Image (tube, rainbow, N blue to C red):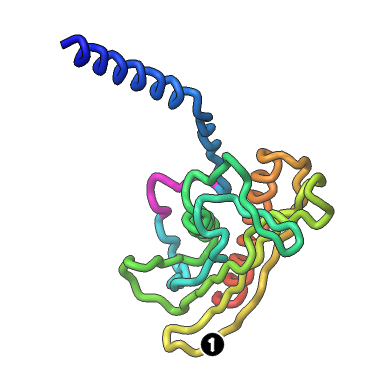
């Protein structure tokens, strides 16, 4: 009985020691969440009379930047900003920004799964969506957003293709300033693309 009691006491002491060790392990800090582009509208904008219907086809988004991590490039080395993430995958936020931009144009954008006849189809490929440290890792980076647009008629004949790029330097080498640069660069590149689509399709 005494031996059994001593064994139980030893086990309890070991368990207490292990629990103490576990509590001393470093805890990871929660990631700060950021977004770019305007928040999605609660209701879809009503179609304007005489609006040209354009179907948005599936395009590609730079693979390394498509999820919720914030991509940076220093020379040929890719890295993600620690403890900082987008509130949703970057390709989702970008698509929301595109939809919002077309809401204010004479183009009625039709997304996949939506019903409606269309005169044109638009494919957008986001080829660069990154913060580039061209002047070293200590200097503020420049956010580069580069996209390629291809417009075709409903019979799949080509209407035109165009590349659009925006480069916005961050005011400081800190996450908030970099996110602001992403927001501005996205809006600029998308704005150029929307203007081109309007001029080409209307």
Percent position of residue 49, x then y: 43, 64
Q: Decide if residue 53 is in sight here.
A: no
Farthest residue to the top: give it.
2
Q: Decide if residue 202 is in sight here.
A: yes
Q: Main secondary structure of the magenta part?
A: loop
* Apparent side of residue 129 relative to residue 90 in the rendered image (left or right): right
Farthest residue to the left: give it.
1
For mark 1, what is the residue?
A: 158
Percent position of residue 66, x then y: 52, 59
Residue 134 lies in what quarter of the image?
bottom right
SS class, disc 1: strand
At x 47%, y 48%, the residue is: 88
Residue 64 lies in what quarter of the image?
bottom right
**What segment is highlighted magenta in the picture?**
38-45
Dot 1 crowding, Cα within 10 Å, few <14, some 14–19, many 20+: few
Q: Quadrant of the N terminus?
A: top left
Is-magenta flag for residue 44? yes
At x 55%, y 36%, the residue is: 32
Q: Quadrant of the C terminus?
A: bottom right
At x 20%, y 9%, the residue is: 2
Q: How many marks?
A: 1
At x 77%, y 40%, the residue is: 172
Instruction: Out of 135 and 51, give the one closest to the viewer.
Output: 135
Tell me if residue 149 comes above or below residue 21 in the rendering. Answer: below
Percent position of residue 42, x then y: 39, 45
Residue 165 lies in what quarter of the image?
bottom right
Tell me if residue 183 comes above or below residue 120 in the rendering. Answer: above
Tell me if residue 60 comes above or below residue 142 in the rendering. Answer: below
Percent position of residue 116, x then y: 33, 71
């Amino acid at each position: 009985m005494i031996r059994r009691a001593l064994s139980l006491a030893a086990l309890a002491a070991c368990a207490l020691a292990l629990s103490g060790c576990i509590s001393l392990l470093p805890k990871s800090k929660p990631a700060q969440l950021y977004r770019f582009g305007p928040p999605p509208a609660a209701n879809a904008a009503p179609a304007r009379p005489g609006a040209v219907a354009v179907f948005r086809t599936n395009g590609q988004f730079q693979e390394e930047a498509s999820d919720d991590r914030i991509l940076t490039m220093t020379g040929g080395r890719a890295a993600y900003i620690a403890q900082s993430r987008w509130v949703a995958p970057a390709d989702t936020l970008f698509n929301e920004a595109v939809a919002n931009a077309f809401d204010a144009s004479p183009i009625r954008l039709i997304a996949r799964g939506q019903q409606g006849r269309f005169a044109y189809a638009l494919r957008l490929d986001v080829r660069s969506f990154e913060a580039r440290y061209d002047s070293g890792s200590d200097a503020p980076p420049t956010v580069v957003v580069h996209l390629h647009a291809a417009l075709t008629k409903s019979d799949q004949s080509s209407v035109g293709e165009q590349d659009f790029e925006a480069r916005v330097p961050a005011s400081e080498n800190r996450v908030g300033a970099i996110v602001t640069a992403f927001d501005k660069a996205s809006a600029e590149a998308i704005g150029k693309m929307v203007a081109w689509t309007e001029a080409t399709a209307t």
